[in-house]
């Protein structure tokens, strides 16, 4: 992830106020960073902790609100039928009158 963003171990170490060797040990898997460093690293790399720790990219469909099915949409926005119906009852006669 660091390399994909074009960052060196030294740049990460400087940002987190740790040694470059500590970053190297994290990447090699010999040592794991503490929670504070994980949070700072995630913020610096502009990624979620899940992506940083688990390597999972956030699925855009899961992060967005769950998609509504047709009945949920009707249950939530039924009142729009009145607004659209009212507008159509005004608009259609105007169009018919314009073409006469």
Image: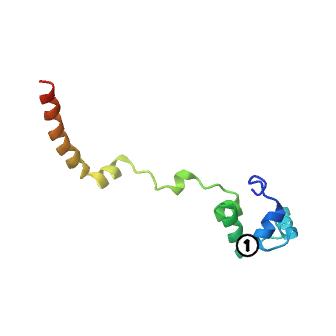
Identity of the residue drawn at 25% across and 50% down: 80
Residue extending farthest to the right is: 21
Q: In the drawing, does residue 86 fall left or right of residue 70? A: left
According to the picture, the residue beneath numbered tag 1 turns out to be 37
Residue neighbourhood size for the residue with mark 1, other residues' Cα within 10 Å, grouped as few (<14), some (14–19), many (≥20): some
Q: Quadrant of residue 49?
A: bottom right
| Circle 1: element type | helix
Image quadrant for the N terminus? bottom right
Q: In the drawing, does residue 10 fall left or right of residue 44? A: right
In the rendered image, residue 2, in percent from the top left (x then y), is placed at 77, 58
Q: In the drawing, does residue 6 fall left or right of residue 97? A: right
Identity of the residue drawn at 39% across and 48% down: 69
Residue extending farthest to the top is: 100
Identity of the residue drawn at 76% across and 69% down: 15
Identity of the residue drawn at 40% across and 51% down: 68
Position above or below: 24 against 64:
below
Image quadrant for the C terminus? top left
In the rendered image, residue 95, in percent from the top left (x then y), is placed at 17, 31
Position above or below: 27 against 84:
below
Q: Which of 16 and 33 lies nearest the eye of the viewer?
A: 16
In the rendered image, residue 86, in percent from the top left (x then y), is placed at 17, 45
């Amino acid at each position: 992830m660091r390399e994909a963003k074009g960052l060196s171990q030294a740049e990460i170490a400087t940002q987190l106020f740790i040694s470059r060797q500590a970053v190297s040990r994290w990447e090699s898997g010999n040592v794991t960073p503490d929670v504070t460093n994980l949070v700072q690293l995630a913020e610096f790399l502009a990624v979620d902790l899940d992506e940083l720790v688990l390597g999972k990219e956030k699925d855009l469909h899961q992060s967005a609100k769950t998609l509504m099915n047709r009945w949920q949409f009707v249950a939530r926005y039924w009142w729009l039928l009145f607004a659209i119906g009212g507008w159509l009852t005004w608009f259609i006669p105007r169009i018919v009158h314009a073409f006469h």
